[in-house]
Image (tube, rainbow, N blue to C red):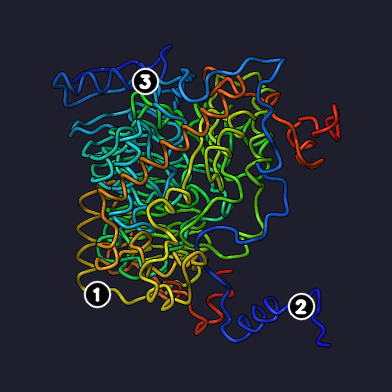
Amino acid sequence: MAEVICCGRSIREINSEIKSRIRGGDQQITVKDPGARHNLAVAILEPAHVTIEGSAGYYCGALADGSTVEVKGSAGWGLAESMLNGTAIVHGSAGNGAGAAIRGGAVIVHGDAAARAAVSMKGGLVLIGGSCGYMAGFMGQKGSLIVCGDTGDAFADSMYATVCYVGGKIKGLGTDTVREDLSSQDVEFLDATLERYLPFEIRKSKPAGKAFKKVVSGRRLWNFSQRDRTIWQEAL
Amino acid sequence: MLETSGTFQPGVIEEIQRKAATGIYDIRGYGTLRERRWATFDDLTFLPCSLTRIPLEGYREKCSTKTILGTRHAEKPIELDIPIMITGMSWGALSLNAKTALAKGAAMAGSSNTTGDGGMLRAERDNSKYLIYEVLPSRYGINIHDMREADGIELTIGQGAKPGTGGLLLGSKVSDVIAQQRDLPLGVDQRSPARHPDFLGPDDMVIKVEELREATDGKVPIFIKMGASRVFDDVKLAAKAGADVIVVDGMEGGTGASPAILQEHTGLPALAAVCEARRALEDIGLYGEVQLIIAGGIRDGVDAAKAIALGADAIYIGTAALIALNCNRAIHQIDYHAIGAAPYHCHHCHTGRCPVGITTQDPVLMERLNIDEASERIFNLLRVMTMEIQMLARACGKSDIHHLEPEDMAALTAEASMICGIPLAGTRRVFGS
């Protein structure tokens, strides 16, 4: 277990030391005194576990491939954005755009997520233990978004093929978004995913898989057409 | 005598009736088709040496074209042999052969090419000498490993053909391989977002730029590209955000597909853009420290030399490069006619049925573009454009093309004089000053 101290150092120095220690063979890195600094643990491309002992600012764990970044506090905007693979875990809550544009891996937020969680996600999993703000799932392309609590307005707006699950109330669906019945595979996936990623103390207060609502794209905005005039009016 | 309305001319009538019949706005490629009634680089002329200045020998005396970008913060600035670069055009909008030929031709000339709104193509990297990796709002194909192979990162806020609006790739071009590369369903009309998913304004863009530096260990320059809009303010904000290089793309810039009205009625011309951008950098004391790239309808070394004289460090070309590849060449004419076009009049990039194999994903059409021959043409164009710049620079007495300056030119119109701050030919006055 290696320790990296943030206090009094530039983000370049902090990230350089994290990467240098991983290259040196350390698989467990603890980042002390993070002070909600931006760009902590960006572009970690090895299967190491980086634990941030406090809150992080923007883009924590972003552009990762294969690492695990665990934040023992809350995280700012763009948590794990554009991740290819790996895991980002936030014990507290996350700012806007958690899991934005990820292409794989898992972004796990034990608390709430602000607006546009999972925006433009292209694969992988975004799991919000609490509730999320408006436009979560906006333009989702692939992968799964699970919100255990309530959603904000315009949920899952203008999606391509991301599949969304909501345990609480949906304040409002976005454009070209439809509800779909859960299949047995969906329930199995939800139960297994919640069990895998949420600690029991958090999971015990969440709905079971069968109680979730499934939301997918209505696919009427996928191609330009005047057949569905109302959907285009809403979109425009 | 038949009379025609000055307001509702035949083209206007046809367009209204098309809208009424289809219920769909017009989408096409290429860029603005408007007659150029605004001030352009053609409204400037060079003032070569006579008695007040001594020229260099035009055909032989040394005139440096070396162009260095990213000196502000990057550990490894880009050192190009020439000031003409290939702008970002996506693999998806363009065929694999076109992207590869652009990379190869640019490398032969000692210059760079740029990825585009679809991530990096392996053949593009393998054939490039210098590759700029674009990070766009859509983040299609984003891949940290590709970014770390790049020689520069370009954070794109917008483009000249349609500032403020995201890209378009119609379903006919979202083939299996492109759908896979972009993580999209096959055949969708892909409409890219206009906003980045993880920052909104100039304040958090500062953090974004820092993130991109961290992701590339501070080695390569960070470019910020924008469509020419409120250039004076936007350039200052981009510089404040930490950009090493700022790209301003004028309204004459091309696109693979876009609503036609955006191409025709948004943005500023490249001439105005370069003047505003220079003033902005001078205003904050960063002119020369932050490098400036100008794009948008640059056709030849003359346009490029004028842009450099007005303050640009380098020039992006897009449409001109595609024309060098064979765009609008009078070959395969039946296929032009099949899509309602003709050589010299084709702006049908959006259809995916490019008769010359450039803006298509159809393997049969793509094969029409021979990579080796096409890359040779790109090399030739870049070489001739560079020689044209040198020719003008030598005539103005400059041993380095980057020594060209506004004082080397006169304005041919009052508008150009006002925009450029250059005296109108035949006067000693800068109009509007």
Q: Are marks 2 and 3 in contact (CB under 8 Å)?
A: no
The amino acid sitting under disc 2 is Phe
Pointer 3 residue = B76
Is there one chain holding both mark 2 and mark 1? no
Is there one chain holding both mark 2 and mark 3? yes
Tell me how far mark 1 sits from mark 3, CA to CA. Answer: 54 Å
The amino acid sitting under disc 1 is Ser
The dot on residue A183 is 1
Q: Nearer the viewer, mark 1 or mark 3?
A: 3
Pointer 2 residue = B8
Residue A157: percent from left, percent from top: 47, 64
Q: Nearer the viewer, residue B125 or A228?
A: B125
Residue sitting farthest toward the top: A8
Say few, some or many: other residues with alpha carbon within 10 Å of mark 3 (under 14 / 14 to 19 / 20 or more). Answer: some
Please tell me which residue is depicted at 61% across the width and 50% down the height of the picture.
B251
Callout 2: residue from which chain?
Answer: B
Visible residue check, residue B230? yes
